[in-house]
Amino acid sequence: MRATLEISIYPLLQKNKEEEYKKIVKKFLSDISKKEGLVIESNGLSSIVYGDYKDIILLLQEEVRDYLKKYRSVFVFKIGKGTLSYRNK
């Protein structure tokens, strides 16, 4: 089954660590973009991931788990059935 995931990561900042916030977000985007079989579009608010439901759940199990272990952060995500893209192709 095809699915669409909208995901955002919000690292919880420590004092005087604004640059670290950007590095964590960019590293997360780099790591998830390496996953085969997924199409990822990012903007200033969130990233949209298109792919097979199983692959998306695996991404959540692996990458989100790893980032929660490494960094104090909050993830916000929505998942829906199908490829939920309304761009003109």
Image (spheres, rainbow, N blue to C red):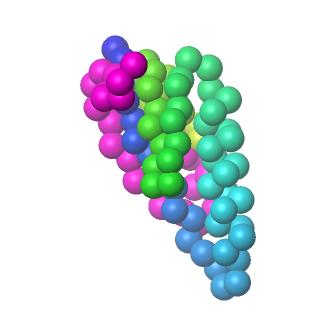
Give the quadrant of the N terminus. top left
In this rendering, is residue 46 above or below 61? Answer: below
Highlighted range, magenta:
64-89
In this rendering, does residue 67 appear at all? yes
Percent position (x, y) of residue 57? Answer: 45, 30
The reply to whether the magenta stretch includes residue 87 is: yes
Percent position (x, y) of residue 43? Answer: 50, 47
Residue at 35% in and 24% down: 88
Residue at 33% in and 43% down: 78
Percent position (x, y) of residue 8? Answer: 47, 52
Residue at the farthest bottom position: 15
**Which sits in the foreground, 58 or 43?**
43
Residue at the farthest front position: 88
Q: Quadrant of residue 54?
A: top left
**Which sits in the foreground, 88 or 80?**
88
The reply to whether the magenta stretch includes residue 70 is: yes
**Which sits in the foreground, 1 or 23?**
23
In this rendering, is residue 66 above or below 51? Answer: below
In this rendering, does residue 60 appear at all? no
Is 73 left or right of 69, judged from the image as shown? left
Is 52 left or right of 31, judged from the image as shown? left
Q: Quadrant of residue 14?
A: bottom right
Give the quadrant of the C terminus. top left
Q: How many marks?
A: 0
Residue at the farthest left position: 81
Residue at 27% in and 25% down: 81
Q: Quadrant of residue 45?
A: bottom left
In this rendering, is residue 6 above or below 20? Answer: above
Is 77 left or right of 58, judged from the image as shown? left
Residue at 48% in and 43% down: 47
